[in-house]
Image (cartoon, rainbow, N blue to C red):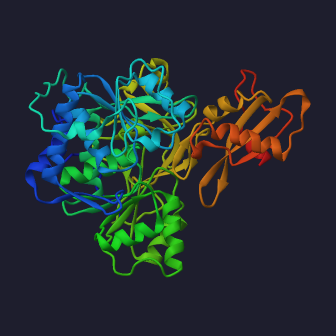
Amino acid sequence: MRPEPRKNLSADPSGRFIHDLVLDACRRSPEKTAIVDASYPEPRRITYAEYGESVERIARNLVGAGIRPGDVIAIYLPNCWEFAATYHAATLAGAIPIPLNPSYREREVRYQLESSGAVAMVTDAPILQQTNLSGLPGLQRVYMIRQTSAGASPFADLLKPSAIGLPSPLRPPTETLAALPFSSGTTGLPKGVMLTHSNLVTNVFQLNGAANLRFDEVTLAFLPLYHIYGLNVVLTPVLSLGGTLVFLPRFDLERVIDLMVREGVTWVPMVPPVMNALCVAAEQGRFPRQHRVRRVKCGAAPLAPELARRFTDLTGIPVVQGYGMTEASPVTHVGTLEPYRPDSIGLPVAQTDCRLMADDNAQAAPGEPGELVMRGPQFMLGYWKNPEATAAVLRDGWFWSGDVARMDEDGFYTIVDRRKEMIKYKGFPVAPAEVESVLLEHPAVRDAGVVGLSDNEAGEIPCAFVVLRDGNPGSAKIAEDLRGFVAERLTSYKQPRKVEFVANIPRNPSGKILRRELRKLL
């Protein structure tokens, strides 16, 4: 059955700001539960009225603390209601939120704070234990949500009643940044992705229409809010409809199973390793029989069709696959239930055009694979202070994804090859160049190359090939030392799980690492 293409949105998103969607829902359903925050020992329940009031208070107090339109505010927290409220309050105050991974090491945190010019941060004392923020002249204020330390203010200060006025927007939603998440791209250090209110609001409407999300959704939200998947596929879409979010700071199988039943969860966004863990639980008889889950959405990493079918056979829950990227706010494709095609990323969302381009930059022949090139109102303005990187992917209004896809006769797209250099560890992107740059700082390393190694549980694991100085052949102890060296500087999912010692790193005449040759060694 050939479905109708998705062309139009259910409403016109032009002129809307991201916080407007949520505050409108707060006014529509004040008594309804917006958030169940299971990051607390006893889950904390927050109504829409309470959430809306908190957002407005935080925004007013940020303005009172000197935050001005266009200032950058870092949110360095795991999933919790304080993260969500700070994000929407920052945009209400005219600021630009930048979400930070709470597992980041000092090196990664400082890089993103310096790159973005963040003037304020909302975090918590335990997260900052291993991070030195000194020497960041732009960072003027730090707020801590549950525990405070010297030089920081309690988050409670932002929740005090305030009559301070909120600024009027200086620019329209199409020009005002609403988020600055950092993306690894395919090479190099992470780049700030400039997403406007219009980008994000449009994608909320595109997703809600394509995924058929409803006002009565109860969504289990363990996907991290610092990632665009959690931020604009889970957080704002569900709240904009008046649904309920059940926050967990991270995936925990036992708690997921418990909350799924206790809270009457209807929708679970996930990544392939989580789906695999739930399959194992179902095979062991631990998956709840009495649940209300209508469907799950899987994204952020390639999903094997066999895994999707296995999950549905074991649980009775259909799987909708999706596709996107930070640069697209993030959704560009969503699967369908009728026809049911878990092997495909589905159809383009509304107002999204796609081309498949062959190596000669001509359109690929029908049925043939080609690089997926797209355009639509959800695509970024560009990379923060990086016009060269922007020009490399945005050409004449089209975004060149670097992913190779095929379209069948019914219009369904399937990814057949990913960005060659990117590694996806449990759905998290790892740029090999970033890991290589750290390895090259070690005094014993002369050269290094990093590639992904297939892994049943993680999808891929980073594997490092290292050339040591002075002809040293390497040893298990040196490999352990190198892993520890990287662990001190990069977050856990970027660390090499395997280190191989080689005589040289294969490169082309221009010096580019021939990763295909390294993969052959695996």
Identify which residue is drawn at 63% across, 32% down: 433
Which quarter of the image is occupied by the N terminus?
A: bottom left
The residue sitting at the front extreme is 150
Residue found at x 23% / y 37%: 157
Residue ID at (69%, 37%): 485
Q: Nearer the viewer, residue 3 or 521?
A: 521
- Asked where in the image residue 193 lies, by quadrant, the reply is top left
- Left or right: 22 in relation to 402: left
Asked where in the image residue 353 lies, by quadrant, the reply is: top left
Is residue 298 in view from this perspective?
Answer: yes
Q: How many numbered discs?
A: 0
Q: Position of residue 238 (x, y in %)?
A: 25, 54
Residue 152, quarter of picture: top left
**Residue 389 in the image: x percent, y percent?**
49, 23
In the image, 235 versus 135, the foreground residue is: 135
Residues 355 and 99: in front is: 99
Q: Does residue 18 appear in this view?
A: no
Query: Residue 276 location, x and y as percent?
Result: 53, 66
Question: Where residue 267 sits: x, y (%)?
Answer: 32, 63
Say whether residue 10 is left or right of residue 237.
left
Residue 55 sits above or below residue 26 on the image: above
Q: Is residue 345 above or below residue 16?
A: below
